[in-house]
Amino acid sequence: MSILIIAEHAEGVLKPSTLNAVAAGVEIQSHTGGDLDVLVAGHEIAPVASQAQAIQGVATVLTADSPAYGFGGAASIGGLIANLAGYSHVLAPATSYGKNIIPFAAAKQDVQAISDITAVRDAKTFVRPIYAGNAFATVETSDAIVLVTVRTTAFEAVADTGGSAAMRAVDVMTAEPTTLLRNELTKLERPELTSARVVVSGGRGMQNGENFAMLERVADKLGGAVGASRAAVDAGYVTNDYQVGQTGKVVAPELYLAVGISGAIQHLAGMKDSKVIAAINKDADAPIFQVADYGLVADLFTAIPELEETL
């Protein structure tokens, strides 16, 4: 049986998270055989479909082009997935996009979705984190169709060049079960949190939202993104777009700089897979230092300006 990857895209660009989901699909393919296909659903998706054709390991790119899919709603795209026959596995990135779609598609097919997998044991057995990442559960499904979301930080992205997949249009659903009333997008000049090479995050120690400008200047010098702990978001320093953690975004950049973040377990769950973790905190006993590769015990209001000047 074949494997289907749901492509995540925005504004005509294929998101890197798709490449991580394909990597997980390749591991499943090693146990099942069969083809690995990618579904690109949306409106005016030709540029995205062309990008998906170049992904290594992909046999066919399925396209579903309709205004009904333009905003990536769970009911429309999840319903489309449920109507596609011939696939033993359906995978999507464990982003807000994938977590919105896969449960709906699973419910439509009366199977149980498996969320946030970090490893593939065989075609029916997967590893996923529980207890905020402090333990890992190995789960086995008996469902005929397996629907999973993939933690992107756990799988090395496949190459997005060199592939030569075929392209095939699929029948779109005639009914439009949901209607978009309003779409509010936050435009950022910096890289997206989940794909940034460097993330500079602030916590409650920043004291107020205005002080996040310090982190923004450092992030700009490093070509990185700005994040925040839930404590900083709850305090109103920044919006929840910035939140890194169990209930926010999961990131694994090359460098994660935690500033004024104590290191609550929920925050660590969202960033502990980073390649290098550096922390600045005036409390030498802060839990963040237990996972940090480099730690500086200092007042951030002294250290960050010095860091900015040095950079």
Image (cartoon, helix red, strand yellow):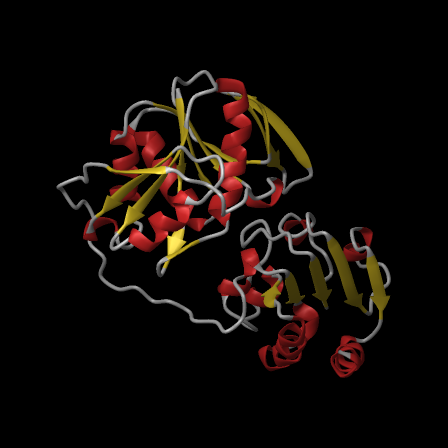
Q: Position of residue 81 (x, y in %)?
A: 30, 34
User: Residue sitting at 19 percent across and 36 percent down?
Assistant: 171
In the displayed image of the protein, which residue is found farthest to the left? 174
| Nearest to the observer: residue 142 or residue 29 | 29
User: Residue sitting at 80 percent across and 77 percent down?
Assistant: 303
Against 287, is 127 above or below? Answer: above
Q: Position of residue 125 (x, y in %)?
A: 55, 21
Against 179, is 311 above or below? Answer: below
| Nearest to the observer: residue 223 or residue 230 | 223
Against 168, is 188 above or below? Answer: below
User: Residue sitting at 48 percent across and 35 percent down?
Assistant: 57
Against 226, is 101 above or below? Answer: above
Q: Quadrant of the C terminus?
A: bottom right
Apparent side of residue 170 relative to residue 160 in the rendered image (left or right): left
User: Residue sitting at 56 percent across and 44 percent down?
Assistant: 157
Q: Quadrant of the N terminus?
A: top left
From where the camera sits, is residue 89 visible? no
Q: Which quadrant of the structure image shows residue 307? A: bottom right
Count every numbered label the image shows and give the total. 0
Q: Position of residue 129 (x, y in %)?
A: 61, 36
Q: Position of residue 5 (x, y in %)?
A: 41, 36
From where the camera sits, is residue 28 visible? yes
